[in-house]
Structure formats: structure tokens, C-alpha cells
Amino acid sequence: MTTTVSASPQSPPERLAPARPKTGPRAWATRAPLLPALVFLIAVTQLPFVATLVISLFDWNSLNPDKRSFNGLGNYASVFTDAALRESVVTTVLLTASVVLATVVLGLGLALLLDRTFFGRGLVRTLLITPFLIVPVSAALLWKHALYNPEYGLFNGVLSWIGDLFGDTSPSRPDWIAEMPLLAVVAALVWQWTPFMMLILLAGLQSRPAEVVEAARLDGASAWQTFRYLTLPHLRRYLELGILLGAVYIVQNFDAVFTITAGGLGTANLPYTIYQTFYQAHEYGLASAAGVVVVIGTIIIATFALRVVSSLFNEEANRA
């Protein structure tokens, strides 16, 4: 007689219970060192913004402090209907779009060059990064006096030297800032922000799978085909990130406009117009409303930038 031994089914492994958040004195002891930083962050960023939001609801001119009154959303209506503010918005869009487009194209070209191996590449990379490390006001002063000055600037000095070579005894000495003010500001910003784009795109180029590029070369793909069908699609996320971050920075730019043109000749962007409204016209409520609009627009752009950054991290994690 055979006996059948029935094996008892094995119980499934117990699932690990999700970790519960720590509570009690020990948890507060571990979080206490972060409280000063949190309080400092709130005091420096959030409280001033709340104060600006409150002031934007008032009709407040510091020259007539006794006539301060609640204005509701009237200041915001003025922001979108005032001719000077509308013109500054258009100038901001033109300035941001032109600088970002130029820096992306130049940064991509420099990144493609630095992705190659050649003697002295580290030194060249350091020299190309240098403009981004200069204080913005110092960079603007450099362009205004050392390059643009019609009497002793480098640009007119080069024109004079070329004129002497061809026998022109009275070469033209253009006033670069007066004749092309917006282009003068754009050139200074492009020079300063191109290294930023170059670094982002260079990081993207160096993250390409080397075996894929080598396989394309073995299959007979030309350099242009490799760039168009492999490099450019791979750099799409990095291009989006550079454009979004560049737009966030350039939209808020004040130093170059203030230093080179002082907001004149049609170069007053929105940050400079806010400065004029607050410090020269003393319209605290209107300036605060314009500042809130700029912050909201910057937050919208930054949100897209953060999504691009998170997608980059997810792609790298999936690849690993």
C-alpha cells in the first residue's frame, strides 16, 4: 500500500510592510538641523513675494503716501494695457528669443568641436567657459567701454587698422550703441551665455553611446547623416533644457540693459521697466504687479524646464 504524502503548499513570502514615517522626538532630532535653512528660505523668498503680492493690490505712490488705497486687480489691468509696459514685453520677447537662438547655434557648434580629441582641448575648453564666469555687470562694462566705445573701443580700432591697410585716411567710426542698441545688448549677452549652452550640449554629446556612432560609420554613414539621424535626436532633450533654462535667465536680465544702454533707444525690457516704475516713478503698486507677472511667467517656464530635467534623469536611469 502506497501512501501519498501531500506536500503542504508553501506560504508566499511575506511582503515587506511599507516603512512608516518616523515620528516622535527622534524624528524631530534628525530634522532639526534642516529647520534653520527652511526658515531662512521662507524668510528670503516667500515672505517678500507675499509682501509684493499684497502691495500689488494697492494704488501706492511713495510721493503721496497718504493717498494709498486698495485697487484690487487694477494694477494688473494697467500692466497689460500700459503702452510702455507692452513695448517692454515685446522687447523682452525679442531679446530673449534672439539671445537664446544665437547661443544654442553657437553653443552646439563649439560643443561639436570640443567633442573631438585634439591637443590642448582642456585649455580651449577652459578659455571658452571663461565668459560665463565673469560678473554680469563687469561683462557689460567690458563691452560698453572696451569694445563699443567710438573713440577708443576695439571694434573701431580694428576698423581704423583695416582702413590704414587700404589707404583710407578717414575710416568710419560708428557709434555701435547709438546706431544698433538692441543688437549691442544681444551681442554682449550671446558672448556671456554661449558657454552655458555649450556645456549642456557637450554633456549630451559625451553621453552618446559610442558603439552606435561607430556602427553608423562602419555602415557608411557620412558625418552629416550621423549628425542628423543620431546626434541631433539624442540632443533633443538637452536642447530643450538649454532653451528653457536660457529663457528663464535672459527674461530676468537687467545688468546688460542697465549698463550698456540704460534702457534707452528702445532696449528697455520688462525688468528694467519695473525698475523705472519702482525707483523713478515711485509707483510701488504698479511695479509690484508687473513683478508678479514676471514671476508667474518665469515659474511657468521653470516648470517645463524641471519636467525636461526629470525626463533626462529617467532616461539615464532606464539606460543604466
Image (tube, helix red, strand yellow):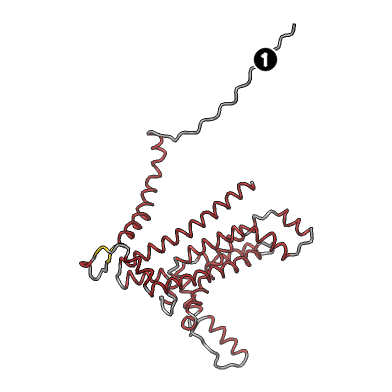
Within the image, what quadrant is residue 170 found in?
A: bottom right
In x, y percent, where is residue 81?
37, 71
In x, y percent, where is residue 19?
49, 33
**Left or right: 271, with 171 as reference point:** left
**Dot 1: element:** loop
How many other residues sit within 10 Å of disc 1, few (<14), some (14-19) or many (≥20)? few
Residue drawn at point x = 26 percent, y = 62 percent: 70
Residue ID for mark 1: 6
Q: In the depicted view, which residue is nearer to us: 296 or 22?
A: 296
Within the image, what quadrant is residue 22 found in?
A: top left
Q: Identity of the amino acid at label 1? A: Ser
Q: Is residue 258 visible?
A: no
Question: From the image, which quarter does the N terminus lie in?
Answer: top right
Q: In the depicted view, which residue is nearer to us: 173 or 240?
A: 240
In x, y percent, where is residue 172?
53, 89
**Left or right: 97, with 85 as reference point:** right
Q: In the depicted view, which residue is nearer to us: 199 or 158?
A: 199
In x, y percent, where is residue 73?
32, 63
Q: What is the residue that sits farthest to the top in this orientation?
A: 1
